[in-house]
Amino acid sequence: MAKAFSENESGLIREKLIENCRICWQRYGYRKTSVSQLASLSGISTGAFYSFFQTKEMLFLTTANEFQQRLYALLSDSRPENPTKLDLAAGFKMIVAELRNNQWYFSLHEDYEVFVRKLPQGFIEEERSKDLIDITNIVELYGVTPKASLAEITAVIYTIVLSLYFTESIGPCHPFALETLIDVAIDKLFE
């Protein structure tokens, strides 16, 4: 019979699974990271893994979401007392620098089609809705007035972030190009 975990143990194991997912994602990528490997590193059986996450993909999504929440917290914590759109641009540049330092986050693009097929139907749309809520909260937090719809603002931010996939192709001028895009986008999107 499987051992039942206390609420405290469950929380600690869940945290370990997420941290070990991030480490394995960084070292091996999505495909080469197995449930048995994640469970073993976290001190649980493979069977116990499924009491925390339905699939490996759900753990990867949770790991990505937790990282995104840390990025939003960074943006929130760096907000000055009376922010302007220039402060918002500086905050987004900080987020981009953090993303640049965490390239594991982008390695999933190689396996994106396989990954998405294993997710519950409608899950991606749900995640996009959450992103829209996060952007809405950031706009409110910084007190900036949008000149475009929040969906359009979210799309522009996605586009800027996705350019990080092409850092090597763009070459050594990519950081400058990215900062310029952020400045232009923030100026065009907000009063």
Image: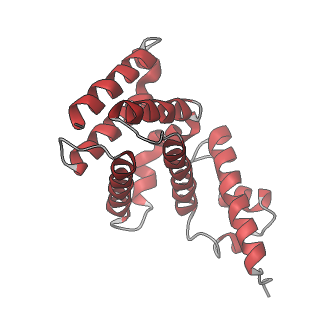
Specify the quadrant of the image occupied by residue 128. bottom left
Instruction: Look at the picture and state if 70 lies above or below 2.
Output: above
Residue drawn at x 49%, y 48% is 72
In depth, the one of 53 and 177 nearer the eye is 177
Instruction: Look at the picture and state if 130 lies above or below 151.
Output: below
Percent position of residue 110, x then y? 46, 39
Q: Examine the rendering and report whether any part of residue 33 can be seen.
A: no
Q: Is residue 76 left or right of 138 when viewed as pictured?
A: right
Percent position of residue 10, x then y? 72, 74
Instruction: Look at the picture and state if 89 lies above or below 176.
Output: below
Residue drawn at x 51%, y 55% is 65
Q: Examine the rendering and report whether any part of residue 41 can be seen.
A: yes
Residue drawn at x 49%, y 36% is 95
Q: Is residue 148 left or right of 46 when viewed as pictured?
A: left
Specify the quadrant of the image occupied by residue 51. bottom right
Percent position of residue 176, x then y? 41, 15
Residue at the bottom extreme, as displayed: 1
In depth, the one of 178 and 76 nearer the eye is 76
Residue at the front extreme, as displayed: 82
Percent position of residue 106, x then y? 50, 38
Residue drawn at x 73%, y 62% is 39
